[in-house]
Amino acid sequence: MDAGTDKGPVAGGDITQLLRQWGDGRDEAFRELLSLAYDRLRLMASAHMRSERPDHTLQPTALVAELYLRLAGAKLASWQDREHFYSFCARAMRWILTDHAKARCREKRRVELRLPLTEDIRWLGEREQDTFDLDRSLSRLEEIDPRKAKILELRVYLGCTATEAAGILNLSKATVDRDMRLACAWLCRELRPER
Amino acid sequence: MDPLWQRVEELFYSALEQPESEREAWLVSQTGYDPAVREEVRSLLAADRRNSALGAPAPAAERDAAATDGPGVELPGPGQRIGPYLTERLLGSGGMGKVYLARRADGQFDQTVALKVMAAHLAGEEFVRGFRNERQLLAALAHPNITRLLDGGVASSGDPYLVMEYIEGRPLDQYCAQRKLPVEARIRLFLQICDAVEFAHRNLIVHGDLKPANVLVTADGAVKLLDFGTAKLLRDPDGKVTQFALLTPRYASPEQLRGELVNTLSDVFSLGVILYEMLTGAWPFGDPKSTADGVDRVLRGREATAPAQAVSEDAAAERSTSRLRLRRQIEGDLSTIVLKMLEGEPAHRYGSVREVKEDLQRFRQGRPVHARPHSAWYAARKFVARNRLAVSATALSVVALVSLTIVSVYESAQARAQAVRAERVSQFAEYTFLSATSFWDSPLRGKRDAIQFTDILDNAAERLGKDLRDDPEAEAKLRGTLGGTYSMLGEPAKGERQVLLGIRTLRRVRNASPRIEPMLYQILCGALNFQGRFAEGLAACRQSVALCRVGDRDRLDGAMHDTAYMAVNAGEPLPEAEKMYRDALRIPGPGWARFISITDSRLGMLRLRQGDLEGGERLLREAEPFLRGKGEPLIEIVPVLYARAFAEDVRGRYPEAVRLMSEALDLVTRRRVAFMEPDNLTLQLAAYEALAGNPEALSRLRGVEGRLTPVAAVDRIKHDLYAGIVEARCGSKAAAERHLRSALATQEKEMSRQPDISVEISVRLMELLRASGRESEAAQAARQGLLAAQRAYGSYFPEHPFVVEMRKSLR
């Protein structure tokens, strides 16, 4: 449906094309996007890594918008592009943070991460294991209910508010709240099983 | 999205809209017998509670007193100060908190105590409030076999704690196992437990969570009961009992599992499980590792495994005896006592722990016990087994689904906790059952066979209008229950009358729950089905579907399934019935896996009958594994078996058909299902035996022939067809021809819209005529059969064995 999908890697910073390809399921596009945005994203991620609470000082959604402007040099064309970009950033954060935690573990150092950025799941991130488990559980949730996984990813890794997530995904806030409730319960069951 | 997940999601959100105390019961009423979905939703709801508890700040009141710990903090470790106590070491931890060994830090008393800290953020406010109310009363519970509650308070973390007498002892099960206690010693221990529980009951306290882990035994063999901390008062000032999702399913009574009120009889049940395990070393409801299956069994009201059967070699060794001896010790009175404690219906259990104790003492003294192996209900079941109505062997799913409906409606009635009504309903039910038990104590006792369970129902039916005069809605509902029960007991005409009365009563109610009327029509259709009045039954089914569409979408799938089933019996065209089954499958409903399998098996039969042998067998193969299950198969496997037998018959593989029919017959005979008539299956088996060349088929036919007086057209046709086949091969050819021609006539006259029936009859008639050398008449029969096949199968299945055989004979 998108002409770009057949063309393979896109030269230059044609981020919109790449985003569309990623949205259409071409996984390599993720790596290419990541290489474009890595420095900025890593900077954002470092706020998590130093155990700071970036939600008060930084506004991730604003940062992501700014990042896009720098990369694409254009306004976000359509809401799909916007959705793809925010989703990509959330995925990238997830990737960077999980990767970081893995590296720390290999070096036998304590994983100091501040997760999540959302108030809905305050217990998340209290255990060292949480970063890995979160990544794994999200992958499982993606299989059975991709929309909830996407919302959770946006809220946890990018610190989007419910309203922002609703705006990005073109859903009503009520739907996001509703989805969040079940998604949080799911996560709690996976990461904090009874007994 | 996965339809199962979609259903889980719907239930999750709807459950959140129910009041917390009613959620569990509501959930059970919605998921029926689909334990997988129920478990999934239940665990998500629990996680939802944990999630908000872990994230939420501590309740305001506690926070004032607290040295403000953040939310979600771990419970204090050893060496902590909790109130005036200093913890020394962790004794254990459970789902709700931790238990420490502790002593007073202020040196006021030098006493070692057990200090139990409840995780308030896990328990929720409701729990904390209940805990405070009850603490006072529990403190007064002074009994040598109950650990004393000494003190209690709220820790600086905001978590409430209990201080109890510290007991050096071992949990009951470990104590018994380690000392290899013989049965007699175990009974003595158990009597001590009974003492304690009885004492609590007299103080209006139910334990509600009795299990071996809550029973400690000291080195000198004294029993100490723990954990009355989670016990509930029998009387709550608001009359409302809050349910905590704390109970251990392994020891919980069916009513607890359904989320109903807990009472002293629930404790009797839990004690029953404990005693059963003490005696046999096994769990009464199967493999304790798959508690979900067992819990399902408990919920379905299935009986416990006979204790003597459950004994293993190892268990015997652990009781310092041999397996044979242990079995002999347990068999008889001891078994009777345990099983009476484990009755699914509370009214059938011992009325109190005291009665249990007294019976056990009688047993020890070798005197006759009061418990009788034949409870009223047991006798009723036996009665049913003896008085089976001659119903179509296929008449199966309707009742299965209807009975499911009855249970669910009954449950949801209680779940909705419209207090007065629920109470009245249960009073009524109790009265009915109580009168049933008093029946046994009446002078009529001894004339056991004279007593019929239906008498008890008659009695109830008569009282119903009076007792519930000012609550017509409850009356209507109960009339439905009663009607369904009558039908199951083989009194469908009485059942029909009750349902009709129920429908009439319901008309008087304004704003009745929209779920009742479709249920009544569904039960009506079951009652008509048993009387062979399929056309009327079909009308009732259609009414029920229409009502379900607006009032109770959860039962829509069941209603459509019943309609399709009834349409087949009533002689409606098969493709229409097939479409209805397929539509029913599209609606996810309660008990889905089971429902899909049953419906698949029906669809399979319909495909077979429309000439599609491969498609039909594929559906049957898909349905089979679930219905067969792991251990004992569900009774719904029977239609799969005879459908497969039919397919083998068509393919001419008669020995295989015989094997499948024998299995079906064996199951029905062994399980004594009230609504399945073994005689019809016997007839079909005899036909396949005859085709397989077994001359004994004739005596089998003679054995049942006289008993059968089929009413419905479909049953008359089958009767004639199978009898015709047997006569043709092993009996009188004239009788065979008479039967087959009569079958054809009935088909043409009353079931003309299901031409497939006459295909098989024609084939058999053709064979018979050729064997007698009447070639032209045989050709006539073949032509008639081919015409019917054309109508029944279309031109889709030219390779159909019947078609091939008839073509060949015409050449």
Image (cartoon, rainbow, N blue to C red):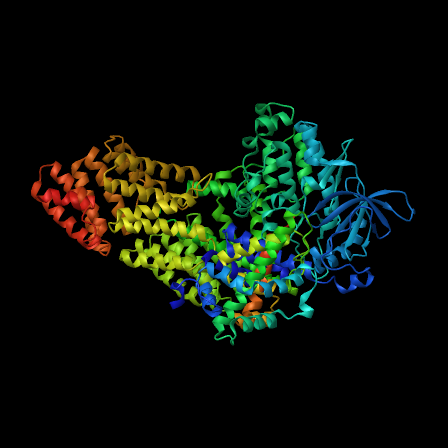
Left or right: B619, with B377 as reference point: left
Task: Specify the farthest residue to the front.
Answer: A12
**How far across and how far down the image is residue B72, in percent?**
71, 57
Residue at left 34%, top 46%?
B620
In the figure, B540 relative to B724: above or below? below
In the figure, B180 relative to B284: above or below? above
Quadrant location of the C terminus of chain B in the rendered image: top left
Q: Which of the 4 quarters of the picture holds residue B144?
A: top right
B237, B490: nearer the viewer: B237
Determine if residue B25 is in view: yes
Left or right: B6, with B734 as reference point: right
Determine if residue B148 is in view: no
Quadrant location of the N terminus of chain B in the rendered image: bottom left
A190, A50: nearer the viewer: A50
Residue at left 27%, top 40%?
B648
Residue at left 25%, top 37%?
B653
In the figure, B9 relative to B443: above or below? below
**How far across and how far down the image is residue B641, in percent?**
35, 42
**How far across and how far down the image is residue B490, in percent?**
41, 48
B183, A83: nearer the viewer: A83
Total marks shown come to 0
